[in-house]
Amino acid sequence: MREFLQFEFLGNTIETYFEVFAAIIIALVIKRIISKYLAGLLFRLFERAGRTFHKQAFMQFVVQPLETFIFLFIVIISLDKLHLPEFLNINIYRTNVRQILDSAANIALIIAFIRLCLRVIKYFALVLEEKNIETDQSHTQLIVFFRDFFKAILYILGVLLILRFAFSYDVSKLITGLSIVGAAIALATKESLENLIASFIIFFDKPFITGDQVKVQGFTGTVEKIGLRSTRIRTEQKTYITVPNKQMVDTILDNISMRTQRRAELKLEINLTADADDLKQIIAAIKNIIQRNHVEGSSIFLSDITKTSHIITVEYFTDMEQTAEEFNTLREEINLDIIQLLKSTPV
């Protein structure tokens, strides 16, 4: 038996073939178990970081590419124990069969690793999109952009790894060239990059979201879309304007939807024939009108005296839960009551 195991065939003993074959069989058996275990460890790391994810979906995305990577890794290590037969040990244009096989193995490992990373990125993108749909749908486009951006980075990284480890190419010069080209492109598209960076600031800082009513650059309207380059606003005149994201970030922006109360102001001009007692009665009567309408705060006072009239300022605040129509109806009722009051007051 010992002599049979030591018998050489194609440059390797039968015992070596058995060992390699056994390692491949073991890899087929345990790859699923190991991949599930490693995926579970990775998932627990995210949980400890305070993140909430769907474990079942995570396992579906990660386990299959992870077991492929593990299987390839074990197979390549096992096959490395085999010696190449002499009749295959030939040179092919400055290289030999062994180097070609090593390069193919490296390419397979790199592709499997990049595929695993792509699946992880896809999973996190889906989780963020689902969370965004439940809370705020305004930044789904940015999530898709980030997903595609990191996928492109991984593709470039994969190509560089293949050039370095499969073809022994010095990628430092290539990286330097890409840096110069990237700098030239950045200078040529300076404004576009500024707007793109501003869109990231809007995404993370959230000074406004889709549906907010804002005032910027002298325009007041409702944000209908936040893009990668600009923000679209439907103005009060029902026109549709486009504001570059850089201006939305750099200029003073009034987010009207974030106010805690609605404010109404009214200035009344009372004839100079009215004396102090008449003015006190009018102010007291207006306060009663305001209080009857259950506003959250008010201020009624004699604010100015001009050559032609006394100026009484009426200012009050209402709950933001009111719709614009309800707020305008309340203002109308208060104004009509004040008109009726002034009509019945002999001033």
Image (spheres, grey):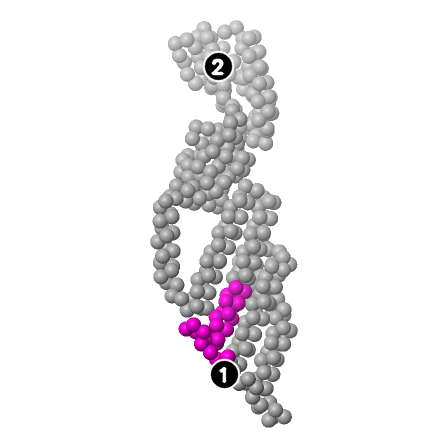
Quadrant assignment, res 194? top left
Q: Secondary structure at mark 1?
A: helix
Residue 242 lies, with reference to residue 110, above or below; the image says above
Residue 86: mark in rendering: 1
Judge whether residue 110 is colored magenta: yes
Q: Nearer the viewer, mark 1 or mark 2?
A: 1
Q: Position of residue 132 (x, y in %)?
A: 57, 46
Q: Position of residue 256 (x, y in %)?
A: 50, 32
Judge whether residue 340 is colored magenta: no
State left or right for residue 176 relative to residue 266.
Answer: left
Residue 96 lies, with reference to residue 130, above or below; the image says below
Q: Which residue is mark 2?
A: 268
Mark 1: which amino acid? Answer: Glu
Question: In this orientation, which residue lies closer to the viewer: 227 or 44?
Answer: 227
Question: In this orientation, which residue lies closer to the viewer: 280 or 302?
Answer: 302
Alpha-carbon span between mark 1 and mark 2: 107 Å
Residue 27 lies, with reference to residue 57, above or below; the image says below
What range of the chain is rendered magenta?
87-112
Q: Secondary structure at mark 2?
A: strand
Q: Quadrant of the N terminus?
A: bottom right
Please give the name of the residue rendered at 37% of the width and 55% of the height, measured from the top-left corner.
Answer: 179
Mark 2: which amino acid? Answer: Leu
State left or right for residue 191 relative to residue 14.
Answer: left
| Residue 234 appears anywhere in the view | yes
